[in-house]
Image (spheres, helix red, strand yellow):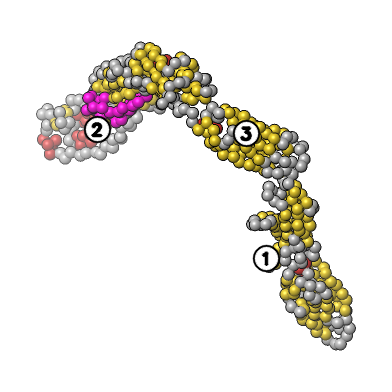
Amino acid sequence: QVFTFNTVEIKVQPSAKVKNGAPMAIVCHADISKSTDFQLKHNFTILKDGKLVFMTVSDKGEARYEISTARSSDTGDYECTVEAGGKTKTSNSSHVWVTGMTKPILTAEKKEVLEGEVVKLRCELPEEVPPLFFFFRKMKMNSTPKEKHVFEPHRNFSVVEFSVEEGDNILQFDCFGRRIVKLEYENSEHSNKTLVTVREPFIKPTLSARPSSNVTEGDRMQFECSTVVARLRDIEIILQKNKTILNSVRDEKVLKYTAVATLEDSGEYLCKVEQGRASKSTKLNVFVSELFPKPILVAPMSNLDENKELTLSCSISGFRKANFSILRKNSNGDVWLKNSRNLTMRVNVNDTGSYSCKAEVRGIVKESKPVRINVYAPVSKPTLSVVSGLPEVVLGKSLRLICHSVTGTPPITFTFYKGNEVKKTVINDTYATFLDENIRENDKRGYKCDARNNHSSGMKTSSILNITVIVPIKNASLGSVPNGEVEDGSDIAFLCTVNEGSWPIHFKFFRKTDHEVLLYERSENADRMLWRKKGMSKQDVGSYYCVASNRAKMDVKSHPITISVILATWQKGVIAAFVLLPIAGAVTLTSWWFLYKKKKAKGPSMEMSGSALATNSTSEKLTRQHNDGDYYSGSGYIEDSENHMKPTDESKGPDLESADVEYTEVEVSTLDPHR
């Protein structure tokens, strides 16, 4: 009994898109091939979105899952798995969409509420499966509906609250649901409409002003705000003007407020009644006419020298009967000066400030605009100096100057001059600074500054400040006499020079071996310096250089020169004596030894030649002489200055003249150079 699964298919009847409430069926069909006709048990399992919804066992190759009334919750992906004889096969997934959602159910917690309370609503989609969206609407006559929406990921209902506002009377509410299917939105139909009746906890307040809403400055005004309330507890009445609370009462039906009218009292007044969340308000506009204009304070001049007289006058245009007072403004409170329309006083610097006057008529007090009075002390002669201290500057650098006046009422105007040219004007309190950039060698060196303020004495000028321009050192070089070599024990002179640079110049001489050694330093009012070093020795061999600097504070280093120490002349003589004398002795000894060998070689040759010609006595004599000494003497030959052997006249004979001279080779050994 052999079989195999060909295919397993799943189908939706009547179609994959079914209306909500209509019947539908999920059919699973297994196509199996068998070797013979035999009975086979089939286990059918149907899953929706991975969850088991149907399971059956059948002898047939098909199973049917019936849904009599399709709901939107039946929407999903279905698949079928068939198991038979130990073999299993699963179909492809099939999506089923049940269109149309169930109608939501809306309920209200209360059917009747007070203004300021809230209406709590619950909307439910009983047959739908989350996630779901819920939309609530609040509707009233002649008004645009207010809407709220809530996303519910885990439940099929939602609860919201709507506040009941002033003017709400009969309210209607409804809701609808929304879901997402295959990235598409689907909305349910709207729920039933729910009616909620609103009752007023109190009526809209009334606001009145007495004697009227149009009054004159100085009149007494009385405001009254009242309401009718169902429950007096926790009720509050508030009177405001421009968001400023003027008065308030609690647990009462009437509020009263009294004030003397001023121009500032013109405007809109608001009476508000609150109880819980309920709030109602009424507005009233009040206009206050001017009784008299603001006074005007006049000063002949606003800038005065100290110790001068100041006169202040206060007046009201077209109105003379008033009580006047003159004051000085102060951050800690106004300072009263005099109850009068006029004030005269001699001023000093401390009297600088703002002044005003007040006028009072029928209890109405008005104040003038402040008048600024400035009292000036004259500036002192300014002093001009360099910020860094010394009156000097390095060529090419910047120069910062400060001009300062010890006394003088600010603001002070400072003017800087370079030569007679105005360079900068600064307004400050007691000092000002000026930066002259990139000083050049041919610039004018004289600076001055002016200082002035509003005092009638005018301008003061500082003394001229002359600035020294310091030229930096350039191109240091080092030389020596003698140049490069000096005898041991002798002196050497080093000359360090610079091409340019302001005096004094500080020179330093260094020798560089394993480390740098400062040998000598000194300042000179010159562009060169000569330094003599005495008694040079082998320890002084090395590289020498010099460093030059001035007040520009930039060290300039020369190229190094190498100094060698050689032997003195007398040292060379001693060395020559010790070296040449042994050499001369060796040469003399070598010459003597060579002559000795030469003579020794010539003696036997002449003896053999003479034996055939001379007598026996002569031969005996020659032989005896040769044996007795190391050199020949009186043997018929002498040695001349050219070291050639010549026969004497006494030994000449007929036999000797015709005889042939025979020579013997002599081998001379080379002198050992180490001896």
Which stretch did the figure color magenta? Answer: 417-444
The three-letter amino acid code for the residue at tag 1 is Tyr
Q: Using the numbered discs, state the Cα–Cα distance from disc 1 to disc 3 in whole angstroms.
A: 59 Å
In percent of width and height, residue 370 lies at 43, 24
Q: Quadrant of the C terminus?
A: top left
Marked residue nearer the N-terminal end (1 or 2)? 1
In percent of width and height, residue 335 lies at 49, 17
Q: Is residue 3 left or right of residue 275?
A: right
Residue 466 visible at all:
yes
Residue 482 visible at all:
no
The three-letter amino acid code for the residue at tag 3 is Phe
Per the image, the residue denoted by label 2 is 598
Per the image, the residue denoted by label 3 is 223
**Which residue is rendered at x = 76% and y = 62% of the image?**
192
Q: Quadrant of residue 22?
A: bottom right
The three-letter amino acid code for the residue at tag 2 is Lys
Per the image, the residue denoted by label 1 is 185
In front of the other: 76 or 241: 241
Q: Residue furthest bottom?
A: 37
Give the secondary structure at mark 1.
strand
